[in-house]
Amino acid sequence: MEKIKMTTPLVEMDGDEMTRILWQQIKDEVILPFVDLKTEYYDLGLVHREETKDQVTIDAANANKKYGVAVKCATITPNAQRVEEYHLSQMWKSPNGTIRAILDGTVFRAPVMVRGIRPVVRTWQAPITIARHAFGDVYRAAEYRVPGAGKAELVFTAADGTVHRETINEFDGPGVLQGQFNKDSSIASFARSCFQYAVDTKQDLWFSTKDTISKKYDHTFKDIFQEIYDAEYKDKFEALGIEYFYTLIDDAVARVIRSKGGFIWACKNYDGDVMSDMVSTAFGSLAMMTSVLVSPDGNYEYEAAHGTVTRHYYKYLKGEETSTNPVATLFAWSGALRKRGELDGIEALGRYADALEKATIDTIESGTMTGDLCAMWEGDAPACKVTSLDFLRAIRARLEAALA
Ligand code: NAP
Ligand code: MG
């Protein structure tokens, strides 16, 4: 079979631990035999981040901006223990945080669904994608532990010196205070990423905040979304037959639980943090959650939602057999290759990505899966636990048959 040719390179960001092992296995077993893979390779493994004083992460993010599409392996975010383990000269920042700061995007997380692994919520038939605004609010707040009686005020000094002042509370004893912020520019780019992703994936977009209580803060989010929708996306949505609708977060929670799925739910930073864990748990497994960062100017970075699966890696180093689930990482590759094909007009790449995803889902549905999935399997076929490599080989066999 002739391999599929690519024109523009994919930005490849390698990573750490067990997912680094899976990364190579995925390429060897299910990509390189079929695609004449063209990538610009960046090693974001912690060893190389240390060697380059983290410059490699910045270079990779800039390459993502240049070429438009990247695929990223999970990486270690160093903490004190990692500084010791890897003899780091500094506690390098989270690569995802660095990349997000350069691309300025929104993260969309969606589960891969298979028959035989039922969501906890019985009505969910299609994936629910959570879009989380990854800037500001409680994550960038100033806080103060109020020691005793006193008056708390909100003070804003404008660039021209004008002062706005209002009382928050007259404390009669100890308490707590918090000052949050967000910026119109960040809210607008969040909105554009959400609308664009809805158009790309032809799904309805829901957005929810608590604007009835937060009449200025949350209401501004609601207004900015509506203005951008009316001015830039209304026609596109109508042409595709998809819907944008805003609702109060309480109402959204109730509707999501009763829904069939198949839409995007945009959430403010904190809501998205909490709700994405709720939704991914209810869909089954973190190992089946995909994630894509979409920037407002149309750059895409695909990855798995889970981490480097350290516990499995230590077993692997001891020579033990591991059955780590490669699905989310594999779907990061298929998502990135499909997008590359779309942008470059290479239809064969899109067909290959579809076939790869179908072969993966069919393999699981036929009963061949990794250990994490066996534990929640309710399908007809008896579940057969295999190693990551055998799982990928089973996918490859199906893929060869499908593409022959
Ligand atoms: P994790 O790597 O997601 O793993 C947590 C546990 O979830 C694993 O021990 C495993 O459970 C299960 N799991 C996750 N992915 C799996 C898979 N593909 N197949 C099978 N089981 C899977 O989270 P962590 O252990 O908290 O973090 C490890 C490292 O990853 C940290 O250094 C952290 O900084 C990094 N991290 C990176 C990213 C990223 O790059 N996007 C995201 C999160 C964390 P069992 O052990 O019970 O089998
Ligand atoms: Mg969380």
Image (cartoon, rainbow, N blue to C red):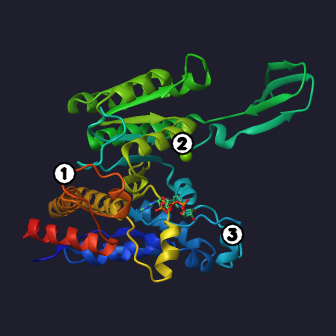
Kind of residue indicated by mark 1: Asp
**C-alpha separation, residue under disc 1 versus residue under disc 2:** 35 Å
- Nearer-the-camera pick, 185 or 134: 134
Q: For residue 25, what is the image quadrant?
A: bottom left
Tell me whether the residue at label 3 lies in contact with that at label 1, contact meaning CB atoms closer than 8 angstroms.
no
**C-alpha separation, residue under disc 3 versus residue under disc 1:** 44 Å
Residue labelled 2 has its Cβ within 8 Å of some atom of ligand 2? yes
Residue at mark 1:
380
Q: Residues within 10 Å of mark 1 (few under 14, many from 20)?
A: few
Please report the residue visible at 44 percent of the width from the left and 73 percent of the height from the top. 20
Percent from the top left, x then y, of residue 278? 47, 40
Eye-nearest disc, 1 or 2: 1
Please report the residue visible at 69 percent of the width from the left and 72 percent of the height from the top. 83
Q: Earlier in the sequence, mark 3 or mark 1?
A: 3
Q: Is residue 94 left or right of residue 108?
A: right
Q: For residue 161, what is the image quadrant?
A: top right
Q: Residues within 10 Å of mark 3 (few under 14, many from 20)?
A: few
Vertical relation: 227 (above or below) 145: above
Vertical relation: 264 (above or below) 77: above
Residue at mark 2:
273
**C-alpha separation, residue under disc 3 versus residue under disc 2:** 25 Å
Q: Quadrant of the C terminus?
A: bottom left
Q: For residue 27, what is the image quadrant?
A: bottom left
Q: Residues within 10 Å of mark 2 (few under 14, many from 20)?
A: some
Eye-nearest disc, 3 or 2: 3
Q: Earlier in the sequence, mark 3 or mark 2?
A: 3
Whether residue 363 can be seen here: yes
Percent from the top left, x then y, of residue 395? 21, 67
- Nearer-the-camera pick, 64 or 256: 256
Residue labelled 3 has its Cβ within 8 Å of some atom of ligand 1? no
Percent from the top left, x then y, of residue 52? 60, 78
